[in-house]
Image (cartoon, rainbow, N blue to C red):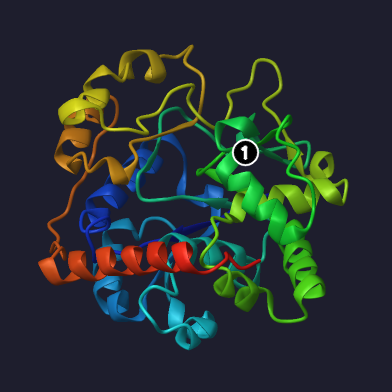
Amino acid sequence: MTKISAILPVKTRGRHYADNIARCDILFSSLRHFTRPDTFDKILIIVPHDEFEEAKVYARAWSDFPVEVVDESVHMTAFADFNKRHQIRPWHRQQIIKLYTPALIDTEYFMIFDPDVFAIHPFSIDDLIIEGRALTYCQPRLREPHLWRPSAKLLQQDPHLDRDGVWWTPTILSKTLVRHLQRRLEELYQQDWMRVLLSNYMIDWTEYTLYWLNAEREGLIDQYHIAAPPGRRSMHASESVWYAGKDGGNLEEWQADHHFAPDGDGLFAVVQSNTFIAPERVVEKLTPYFPIRPQPYRRHASLGLKAAELYSALVRRLLGLFHPKRS
């Protein structure tokens, strides 16, 4: 039986991450309801070293799935050399983890989850891998040109902003194409691909735009990726909650009845974590459609953690004003 791997980078400490355990409970509750655990060869939950032991305890609630908790420090050793707070953006850290995934899996394809993702319709491996290719959701690149341009610059190619490109998590990537990207970065800069990306922390490259642009340059998109054929659901719902709105009102306005309906499109939706909408409100919104099993968890959102994150962002902004962006 064909299977797919999955990767879920998780942080639980900091102003954006303190409720990620609750979000993971929503994700795994949706997977229990809408698919089978054996859809996945393994689900890798990758966490920072100082969160590893605590994460293993929380992950017991998801052990009906083939979950493995991985200490990122064992594999992403280059992180230790970029030890100033402003040098590793949490946003880039999780993207590098995703691009490291081929070293940890046996399957050709792997699905990328974030804690704020949840399933909204039943699916099996046949809905994710179609004719040997990964189900892929694309959007116009002009929706996010500020992310396509830096990645194209890093790869020394045209961003082709007039075209469509892969959309954000959840997404399925090819192990082969990720390795091609790693090789391309090493050829261009004559150093390990991870260090290339870490050194360019001042620009907004992303894992998906790098991956797609390089695969496009090599002419391999159609060999590994496929849009939803007629009569098949796409990867993403037509609408997710990407912005909070006033007092989180966008969640209330999100038409759950429509998206969960039998004729609704999309296999997954998102209530983006940086909206800071409380997980309890998300649970209340989604419980009519699938049972959710939340577990108690400890929130790590001290003033010190918030201050450190804000300091890092401020330092990067100041560096950007006085120094040219690297690439």
Q: Height in image: 212 above or below 183?
A: above
Q: Residue at x 79, y 63 (%)?
A: 180
Q: Along the horizontal axis of the image, is 56 left or right of 43?
A: left
Residue 213, x across and y down, in percent = 74, 48
Quadrant position of the C terminus in the picture: bottom right
Report whether residue 142 is seen. Answer: yes
Q: Residue at x 47, y 63 (%)?
A: 320
Q: Height in image: 219 above or below 323?
A: above
In this figure, which residue is indicated by the disc labeled 1? Answer: 128
Which quadrant of the view contains residue 231?
top right
- Give the number of marks: 1
Residue 285, x across and y down, in percent = 21, 27
Q: In this orientation, which residue lies closer to the viewer: 122 or 322?
A: 322
Q: Height in image: 134 above or below 306?
A: above
Q: Residue at x 25, y 56 (%)?
A: 21
Residue reaching furthest to the front: 322
Residue 286, x across and y down, in percent = 25, 29
Report whether residue 3 is seen. Answer: no
**Disc 1 packing (10 Å; few <14; some 14–19; many ≥20):** many
Q: Along the horizontal axis of the image, is 312 left or right of 99?
A: left
Q: Height in image: 26 above or below 107?
A: above
Residue reaching furthest to the right: 219
Residue 115, x across and y down, in percent = 36, 50
Q: Secondary structure at mark 1?
A: helix
Q: Amino acid at mark 1?
A: Leu
